[in-house]
Every structure is written in structure tokens, then in C-alpha cells.
Image: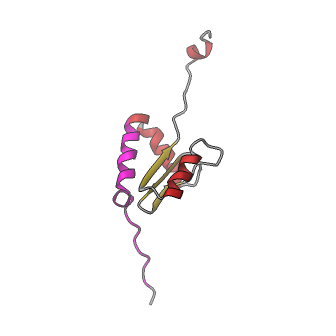
Amino acid sequence: MSQPAAKQPDMRTAMPMTAAWIERKRLDMGKAHVNDCLRRAIAGEPGRFYALEGGHVLGTPFPPTSPVDQWQQYAVVNGVAFAAFIAEPAVVQTPAQERAPC
């Protein structure tokens, strides 16, 4: 008789430093931006969010062309206990800023 699949660990329990970091980023960058990055990275989109903690990985790595790539490589090669990366929010200019003289 086949056994049921093992239950996946709750990521907040498995990655507590990542969970706390995400909560701080929600305060710093805005909940909508952080949640969007998480959703897109979990769906496989690179360059949005990537975290490593205690042998667990969440998200999708940033591409090799990203300035974040060297830090990702460092984290993986050196086996750090925790590392997390998230895309910066896009700066949206208002029409007044676009017309401002230099």
C-alpha cells in the first residue's frame, strides 16, 4: 500500500528569519510590493525574491546579469545560515517631476 506524501513544512516555521525579514520589508517597501514579489518569485519569475535559510530555499534566483547575483553566489558557496533578496520598488515619477528642469 502506498504512503501519503509527506506534509511540506510550514515555511514560517522552517524559515523564521526569512519570515521576520519579509515582515520588515513589508513595512519598508509596502505590503503590496513585497507580496507581488513573493507571488511572482514563487511562480518562477527571476529577479523578484529569493531566500535561503537552514537548507530551505524560497523564490527564484536573480539572473546572472543582476547586481544581486554575486551576493546570491556568495550565500550559496559559503553556506550562510540566512540570506534574502528582493527587487526594489520601481520609482514612479509624477508628471511634475518629469517636467522639472535639470
The answer to whether 90 is drawn above or below residue 39 in the figure is: above
Vertical placement of 5 versus 22: above or below? below
Q: Please name the residue shown 50% across and 43% down the image.
A: 86
Horizontal side of 63 relative to 82 (left or right) equals: right
Q: Residue 31: where, in percent of width, then height?
A: 41, 39
- Residue 92 percent coordinates (x, y): 55, 26
Query: 29 or 63: which is nearer to us?
Result: 63
In depth, the one of 4 and 91 nearer the eye is 91
Query: Vertical placement of 24 versus 96: above or below?
Result: below
Q: Quadrant of the N terminus?
A: bottom left
Quarter of image, res 67: top right
Residue lying furthest front in this view? 78
Please report the residue visible at 48 percent of the width from the left and 48 percent of the height from the top: 38
Q: Is residue 89 left or right of residue 99?
A: left
Image coordinates of residue 79 in percent, x first then y, are 47, 59
- In the rendered image, which quarter is residue 26 located in? top left
Residue, far top: 101
Residue located 66% across and 44% down the image: 65
* Residue 66 among those drawn in magenta: no
Predominant SS along the magenta part: helix
Q: Which contiguous range is marked in magenta?
A: 3-27
Extreme residue in the right direction: 65
Count all numbered tags in the image, as a single digit. 0
- Quick one: quadrant of the C terminus? top right
